[in-house]
Amino acid sequence: MVASWSDRGPSGTKETVGDTATLALHVLTHAGFGASYSFNEGLRKISPGHQMTYRDSLSLCLRNIITFSIFSKKTLSAKFMPQKLKQVGQAAKEFQQYMEEMLAKERASGGEQPAVPNLMSALVRASDEDAQSKERGQSSKLGLTDDEILGNIFAYNLAGHETTANTVAFALVLLAAFPGYQSWLREEIRSVNSDLQRDTYEKSFPRLQRCLAVMFETLRLYGSIVFIPRSTNLEEQIIPLPDGKALRLPPATAVNLNVQALHTDPQTWGPDSLSWKPDRWFQPQTGKRESGLGEQSFIVPSNGSFIPWADGPRICPGQKFAQVEFVAVMATLLGNYQVKPVLSQGQTSEDGKRALQEMVDDSAISAITLQMQQPEKVALQWERLADGNISSN
């Protein structure tokens, strides 16, 4: 991906959002199905027997998730439906066909251990083992039907595709606007890479804390989920308040948590709560850009003040997966490349910074996630750096 961006030279790329979506989908297909594709092919090609690519069918389904709560797939394919809705119905049909083909391929493997451990094979093996136990009268009732397996795979794609892709895209645009943080990241990335002859999750991920801080700060201001719906169900809920009083919520009360308000509360985040500053995630004097690596102390937010993956028993199970994916992407991209806005004639670097900030601030909810409305407004230029050539301008 970054090689294709770099090859575009001074004209840069306006496909950051689309390309990070493709990247996230490649990660999901590898972890979900054990399949690997080159960036410019694979999921971008229409497979035999299909009318859409896997990527396009999934993307269209995700963007119209609310539509599926109103119309059935059969209704969407009806002749009297508008062409736009027919296309959504076709996307649902295509995506289900892709899933069924992958499931059939997994079942055809005969239970052999996959070359790459993945979610699909784990679900199928667990289901088959339960079916075998049932034949012996020892069923645990934990097996899944094929429909349930496909439902879990769809939920896996729904939760892990646009959310992580959007976060990576927002972060890259913001890093282009604030190049000093690129140098700050690169210092850490190169330090970790120089100490490890071979990257391993166990050794490298815990040390890439600045990369994680960029993710947290991006999620704080531009998190994919801007509100979280909750309900008190059939019981009254009592919420203790800091002043010793309590707030009583009646049964069957719907509550929407305003995540963005929570993440920008000056009482928690300080007077600069609306500013994107990844180094705020470190204790003073230990993670600042000018202080060198040293001993970094990552700040753990107070309970309930930072909830991009929700909180409590319903916290997103893909939280760690998303963190590892994001950190890996940052470490790969920023270790040897720098990114900057493509400036029009007469524009200064401050003009470019302002244009990028306006681009990320011009965001709105699209279906269920926060997205930039005009991500193609400013192109980003990627340049490979020679060893030691670290720019902070």
Image (spheres, rainbow, N blue to C red):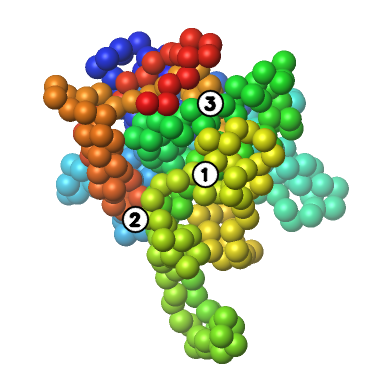
Q: Which residue is mark 3?
A: 186
Total numbered labels placed on residues in the image: 3
Tell me if 98 is positioned left or right of 89 in this view. right
Classify 161 as above or below 73: above
Secondary structure at numbered mark 2: helix
Q: Type of residue at label 1?
A: Asp
Residue, x 60% and y 29% (percent of image)? 188
Q: Horizontal and vertical percent for residue 28?
A: 53, 34
Q: Type of residue at label 2?
A: Ile
Residue 16 is drawn in which quadrant?
top left
Q: CA distance from mark 3 to mark 2?
A: 41 Å
Tell me if 165 is positioned left or right of 79 in this view. right
Is residue 321 in view? no
Secondary structure at numbered mark 1: helix
First reached walking from the N terminus: tag 1 or tag 2? 2
Q: Type of residue at label 3?
A: Arg
Tell me if 141 is positioned left or right of 364 in this view. right
First reached walking from the N terminus: tag 1 or tag 3? 3
Q: Which residue is mark 2?
A: 66
Q: Using the image as rendered, state which of residue 280 and residue 87 is in the foreground.
A: 280
* Label number found at residue 279: 1
